[in-house]
Amino acid sequence: MPHDEAAAIPLLAALKEKDRAKVLANARRRTFAPGDVVVHEGDTSLNLFLVVSGHAVVQHADGLPVAALGPGDFFGELGLVEQHARTATIVAQDQLTCILLPAWEFRTLLEEHPEMAVPMVHTLIRRLHGLTPHEH
């Protein structure tokens, strides 16, 4: 993955370039087709997903959309931090490309680079307030 592409993701932008390269060495890149279910509510949380391109919708068991995700957004952090199952289903709206960070890498990152927590907390606060990911 190009490092400038990764630098455009706020969660990774908090890292120095050499640290981003180290993180990306353990990450996988995956592309989903429109309509693909990326994760199912209730599944075991194994990865943090960072959206590189495309869009996805977040929905709960009733199938109603509760949020939208786009480039630069992330999901899957709650299950990794709290070590529980996925709390929502994520469905690709168009071609969706994500970086997948394994749980162990994500936890290590937060310990070694606490500055990553700042953009994560800002995003979580927006979610709690019910704002879309790009509103301020």
Image (cartoon, grey):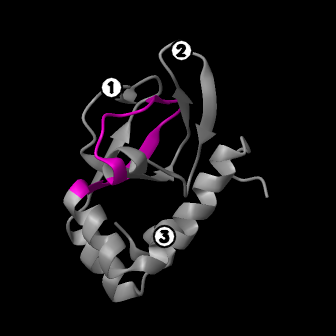
> Within 10 angstroms of label 2, few (less than 14), some, or many (20 or more) residues?
few
Check contact, mark 3 vs mark 1: CB within 8 A: no
Position of residue 64 measured from the top left corner of the image (x, y, whole percent): 60, 17
Position of residue 112 measured from the top left corner of the image (x, y, whole percent): 31, 80
Residue 7 vs residue 44, the one in the foreground: 44
Position of residue 31 measured from the top left corner of the image (x, y, whole percent): 36, 42
Relative to 34, residue 118 above or below: below
**What's under tag 2, amino acid-wise?**
Gly
Q: Mark 3 vs mark 2: which is more N-terminal?
A: 2
**Residue 129 occupies quadrant:** top right
The answer to whether residue 8 is visible is: no
Q: Which residues are magenta?
A: 81-103
Separation of disc 3 and disc 1 at Cα?
Answer: 25 Å
Q: Mark 2 vs mark 1: which is more N-terminal?
A: 1
Residue at numbered disc 3: 117
Name the element at disc 3: helix
Name the element at disc 1: loop
Q: Mark 3 vs mark 1: which is more N-terminal?
A: 1
**What's under tag 3, amino acid-wise?**
Ala
Q: Which mark is residue 42?
A: 1
> Within 10 angstroms of label 1, few (less than 14), some, or many (20 or more) residues?
some
